[in-house]
Amino acid sequence: MQKNPLSHRMASKTIQLVDASGNPVTGKEVAIHQTNHKFLFGCGIFDVIPIANRNVPEDRLAYLEQKLDLFLEVFNFATLPFYWGMFEPEQGKPRTKELQVAARWLKERNIAVKGHPLCWHTATVPWLLDLSNEDILKAQFARIERDVTDFKGLIEMWDVINEVVIMPIFDKYDNGITRISKDLGRVGIIKEMFAKTRESNPGATLLLNDFNTSINYEILIDGCLNAGIPIDAIGIQSHQHQGYWGREKLEEVLERFSHFGLPIHFTENTLTSGHLMPADIEDLNDYQIPEWPSTPEFEERQAREVEEMYSILFQHPLVEAITAWNFSDEGAWLGAPAGLVRTDNTPKPAYDVLKQRIKGDWSTQVTTRTDENGRVSFEGFLGEYELVCGGTKVTFKIEKEGEPEPLTFN
Amino acid sequence: MQKNPLSHRMASKTIQLVDASGNPVTGKEVAIHQTNHKFLFGCGIFDVIPIANRNVPEDRLAYLEQKLDLFLEVFNFATLPFYWGMFEPEQGKPRTKELQVAARWLKERNIAVKGHPLCWHTATVPWLLDLSNEDILKAQFARIERDVTDFKGLIEMWDVINEVVIMPIFDKYDNGITRISKDLGRVGIIKEMFAKTRESNPGATLLLNDFNTSINYEILIDGCLNAGIPIDAIGIQSHQHQGYWGREKLEEVLERFSHFGLPIHFTENTLTSGHLMPADIEDLNDYQIPEWPSTPEFEERQAREVEEMYSILFQHPLVEAITAWNFSDEGAWLGAPAGLVRTDNTPKPAYDVLKQRIKGDWSTQVTTRTDENGRVSFEGFLGEYELVCGGTKVTFKIEKEGEPEPLTFN
């Protein structure tokens, strides 16, 4: 018998239905329906900010709402932007309220939210350059303490620090974060930022995130863990503008980053439906073209690649989240056709493929009858469920640990 | 006034000469002569083993003694081989006595000795392959404890672990050390080996050593230090069979590895007096040729490169040791003409250049007269000295710290 390659994503559940007097409800039809996944299927979905705050013209709002409806049909996880330079463009005037409204909007729709990132050398605030390194560190600490505290209960997951492998040798322009990373060293700055974030929200899930998937990042993580830094999950970026990694590289990366035994999040995934960026471009930001069209042929390629990549990641026991970096081509990074929907909000084949997987093949729907003891038993994907029997509905969870235990429903 | 670029290698000393009654010895000629350097100028000099043990034929012994005389004329530091596979070719029969005799021979000649290496995936013992990983680790610990203890007082400096960047991904052949490094992780195995070595000889100087000078090694060191691993000095290999790094790369490597503030040892330096190995060879061990001659033209190049490289390193305040990996072409690694002397024991220009620097330009010899208080004052390179006045001789040291304080001589 072949082992189910997704058995680590599933568990068994037994529910007993009893009536008001405590007698088993036998031979009745029940409908069981998975309403949410434990696995995090996400997108970078910054458009939630204007939608939730309703601070754009009506026609723009309608367009964005249409986009978001498509997002909500499939996904359960969203990354919101906390780039310091955009979050606090004027010193002392952070966009806290606006982002809280956005995070609450998502929370009300049962979408888990991650804040990205708390510390990064890119898109940081320019006024750090006027400070001494000691004061830059203080400002960065204050920023973390303020924002992580302000969003407690709304955001329980943070990309604490971003792209540390390159951070101290980043030389495109001077910035405050590179300056302090030179002082503290890579492991040192990670240690400080994690400690401050942990202190500000002890229960949050904290990630280290990098686009570097080489041995550099492996050694950095190894050093951090040996230095006692409480990393909850390893964040791996996978912007594949220059071509899909393919099964071999993907499995090789998974193998190498699995040694730590930590959860792995694919935090920023890009597979475009356009021509490939030339392989000789080293920094993706250097590729600037006036138009990067999505074409039917490349949309089919994107769909195949998305299907394979998500399948490999969903089968891997340590992967707990995949975030498509751009939900839509509209406003996508580098102008690439990186979205799952086009600029006119029509779904691409990749969207349909993902919806079929996430809401179909990897989701559990059961219609059955209670047995002579009023019981129904089934195996389902981990996550949240509702069960309907007659006019009554109950919600429950399927979790890996502590399972199976019968649930009584009356 | 230009700052002396070697001022960090020097200190001032004042000595007062008094006679048996305590009266200053005025107007007398004194000769001051540096007998040893604080800086470690070394070679890999494994030939000490047969010489000290006198276990080779007479003519071979005479040849080796001639070689060693040339070594002793210039150097004050020697690396002895502790490759496990050669040190204990038959399990339970380590060559302890033989190596103790060699280390003692060097110690008697005022040569500091380093043991190389205690843990390495190459040239380790094959019988580790029959053990469980748990037992491999125990065997490696036992090896360290035994050997570091057996050589206490003779060897106070160890390359604790060698080439860890590649260790867990080394795939040329299976070996016990790669196996346990996969289990422990890079920082983990370094931590374990340093702890065991430190426990076995708390006062010893312990090095991490690698040929990888990339960001990988930087991040590894950063991780180790943040994990509290007591690294005393950073070991950098510089086998330049494919061509001299040149000033720019050398200074760039020094700059990057200086951030840790730790002493830096150039542990294995090679600059050949032959043709260059082709640049496309990735593992130097793959280059096997029947003959690799030393030529007059390339000997001149080697001398220029040796002079520049040693000058740059001697000027750098954190560098404390340079080891020429092969003193002689005879028996040099890969058959390369890597020595400072030829196979017939004639010195190459590089030998003469180094001797001129080490025993001349970077050494202090003073002839002067005591003043009206019986004093002589001078600035000298750090190290050991003797002072001769009339028929009397005294030895003293010039050290950076606690200087200057007058020394009374009577």
Image (cartoon, coloured by chain):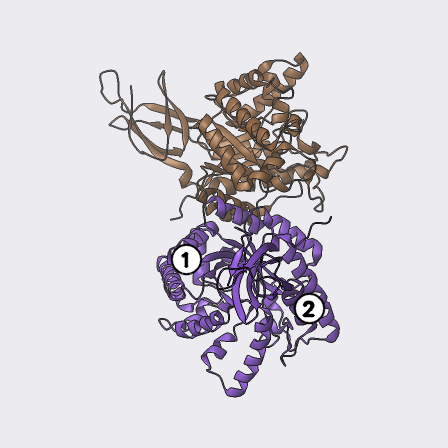
Chain colours: A brown, B purple
In the depicted structure, whether residue B254 falls above or below residue A101: below
Residue A294 at x, y = what percent? Answer: 70, 34
In the depicted structure, whether residue B111 falls above or below residue A85: below
The amino acid pointed to by label 1 is: Thr
Secondary element under disc 2, as helix, strand or loop, is: helix
Which label is found at residue B353? Answer: 2
Identify the residue at horizontal 39%, vertical 65% (top origin).
B147
Along the line of sight, the residue nearer the viewer: B151 or A162:
B151
Residue A7 at x, y = what percent? Answer: 40, 41
Which label is found at residue B197? Answer: 1
Indicate left or right for B15 with B305 as reference.
Answer: left
Location of residue A370 (image quadrant): top left
* Residue density around tag 2, few if under 14, some if 14–19, many if 20 or more, within 10 Å: some
* Host chain of mark 2: B
Along the line of sight, the residue nearer the viewer: A389 or A159:
A159
Q: Residue furthest bottom?
A: B58
In the depicted structure, whether residue A225 falls above or below residue B303: above
